[in-house]
Image (cartoon, helix red, strand yellow):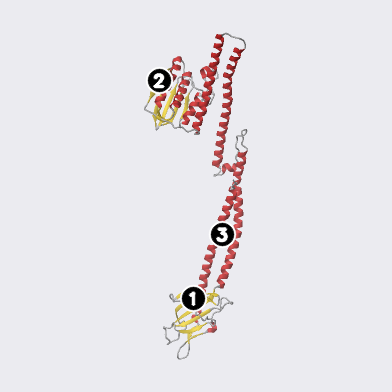
Amino acid sequence: MAQVSIQRRLVASIVVAQLLLAVGLVDVAVFVTRSRLRDAFDTALRSRAMRVAALVRYSEDPGHALIFDKDLAPQPLDVSAPDLYEVFANNQTLIARSPNWPNDKLVLPARGDRWVASYVVDGVDYRAVVIDHIPILDREEGVNPGDFLRVTYASPVAPVLRSVSQVLAYIVLGSIVLLLITGGFSLWALRRSLRPLQELASSAAAVSAINWKLSPPEEARDTVELAPLTQAMTSMLDSLRGAFTQQREFVANAAHELKTPVAILKSTLQSLAQRPRSTEEYRIGLEEALEDLQRLERLLHSMLRLARAEQWAAGSLQRNLPIVEVSMTCQMALERVQPVAAQRGVELEFTANGPIKLAADPDDLELVWYNLLENAIRFSPDGAKVQMAVRRNNGRGYVEVADSGPGIAPVDLPHVFERFYRADSSRTRNTGGYGLGLAISKALIEAYGGTIEPQSRPGEGTRMVVSIPV
């Protein structure tokens, strides 16, 4: 598929917009200019018609006949084509007519005392004005005051057309010059405006698995349109760097955790193979090998469960979930963890304040509560009490697990949900597990749209607060 250039699109859009604007301005300017010139031409025609009417006067003979002084007739506007005029008295008597008056007389139906019309005479376009009921301007005493004139005056429209053509040429030429100037300026401004985006793209291209730092240019950070993109890219790279680092650490930690049981299993089998042994020795060696295999199986199961939980949290896996009662899953987890608590002499206390229902897999919720309870029992002193409470508040459900252990140091509190993380380096695998329980619990709770938050102070115990939608 052919690549698309935003810059070319914007330049084409600007050019097309300016062309449309120029064409529109030219059309409007020509229309207004033509209207104004035509109005001025019509005014000049009326003025010439009144000048022709002023040349009609009464004669000095006893009959006082109307006469026309043709020697004072106005000169034509265009020397290439003469003007035309015609004067009637009382709409009956022809007083005067231009020598070049056409045979097909310029007569139109009356539309009032004044009107303007267009004619074609001998292939020449004329515009004529007709003024009726004009009183005799040069009066004599004793003459009939009721006489009136009708004057028709026509002139070629070629001067007006030439003026319009000249105006059109000037407007078009000016529009082309302005279009070139504004087009060049727009192109320069566009390239200058897109330069921060190009620099941002160059900075993003420098990001790699070794260099995760995005160094956006100052203009990109200060540009209103690019600032959200810059912030989003920075946040995305921080998330990717964290995920990449976490994945890398997970692989290293998983390899380290798998190495120990495999090494122990290998050592056990090598010890059995070094020399012939009795049946009892073989039985004891195989039982130790089976224990190591079970430990290895539990580790692999936890790793697979964590991977699936993270996939559910990311939305890449879809499941049809039933509606379950959260308190019921808590009681199942309490029954399951009861033998562990009995070994330590830890008392389990459970309270529930109203039913809480959630669309979830009951095995997932039971595993979360079991991990939290087991972790609380492990860190509680012998004979202590572990409390579990279920409550509902403001449309959300809360499950809390509290112990009276030594608590978690502030420096370790942000890391308690990291995979393979152990705050106490002295813990053994027999007492401390593999450091995946809380990570699995957090991933499962987030997969159901909830959150899990640790609250702890050294010497005051630890409280795990799980918030879930209901």
* Dot 1 and dot 3 residues touching (CB under 8 Å): no
Q: Residues within 10 Å of mark 1 (few under 14, many from 20)?
A: many
At horizontal 56% and vertical 73% (from top left) the residue drawn is: 158
Measuring from the top left, give residue 60's x and y in whole percent. 48, 89
At horizontal 40% and vertical 20% (from top left) the residue drawn is: 349
Hey, which residue is sitting farthest left in the picture?
354
Residue of label 3? 22
Instruction: Using the rendered image of the protein, determine whether residue 427 is visible from the camera's viewpoint.
Output: no
Between discs 3 and 2, the one toward the N terminus: 3
Residue of label 2? 349
Three-letter code for the amino acid on which mark 3 is drawn? Ala
Residue of label 1? 129
Q: Is residue 238 above or below residue 184?
A: above
SS of the residue under disc 2: strand
Measuring from the top left, give residue 31's x and y in whole percent. 52, 65
Between discs 1 and 2, the one toward the N terminus: 1
State how far apart marks 1 and 3 are (Cα): 35 Å
State how far apart marks 3 and 2 are (Cα): 83 Å
Three-letter code for the amino acid on which mark 2 is drawn? Glu
Quadrant of image for the N terminus: top right
SS of the residue under disc 3: helix
Kindly indicate the quadrant of the structure image that contains residue 285. top right
